[in-house]
Image (spheres, rainbow, N blue to C red):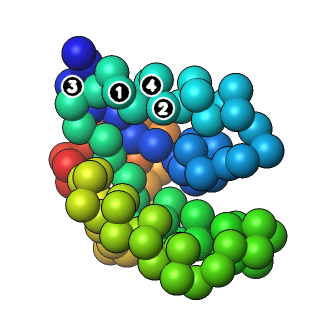
Amino acid sequence: MKDRIFLDTNTLIYVHSITEPLKKQIINEIIENYNEIILSTQVINEFINVMYKKRKVALHELNFAINELENNFFIAQITRLKKPLKSVKNIITHILIAL
């Protein structure tokens, strides 16, 4: 098993997809191969927005899904930076330090 992986919004949407079973299966297999799954608060907010507004998922179902995410995955808080980062390398370094 590998250590950890960060999932983006699209992967969460595929995990809950009923219209894209192959993508759902692939993402589930990826998730099973990691010890720690990391999400950000931004990813969760985007997931809620897409699932509620575009996919028309009921709020009680979304609430259940969010509880499952909170119970099973590490949620990284996104914080505002005091000064802008000048490069992608600095952004990645900042994220890794936060984890």
Which amino acid lies under the numbered mark 3 shown in the image of this protein?
Asp
Q: Residues within 10 Å of mark 4 (few under 14, many from 20)?
A: few
Which amino acid lies under the numbered mark 4 shown in the image of this protein?
Ile
Residue 83 in view (yes/no): no
Closer to the chain start, of discs 3 and 2, is: 3
Q: Residues within 10 Å of mark 3 (few under 14, many from 20)?
A: few
Q: Which is nearer the eye, 91 or 83?
A: 91
- Identify the mark at residue 12; answer none if there is no mark: none
Which amino acid lies under the numbered mark 2 shown in the image of this protein?
Asn
Asked whether the residues under the numbered discs 4 and 1 touch, taking CB atoms below 8 Å apart as contact, a structural biologist would say: yes
- Identify the mark at residue 28; answer none if there is no mark: 2
Locate residue 75, reporting x and y percent.
29, 60
Q: Secondary structure at mark 2?
A: helix
Relative to 48, say whether 4 is above or below: above
Label 2, label 4: how many angstroms apart (C-alpha)? 5 Å
The residue labelled by disc 1 is: 32
Q: Residue at x 58, y 84 (%)?
A: 59
Q: Nearer the observer, disc 1 or disc 3?
A: 1
Asked whether the residues under the numbered discs 2 and 4 touch, taking CB atoms below 8 Å apart as contact, a structural biologist would say: yes
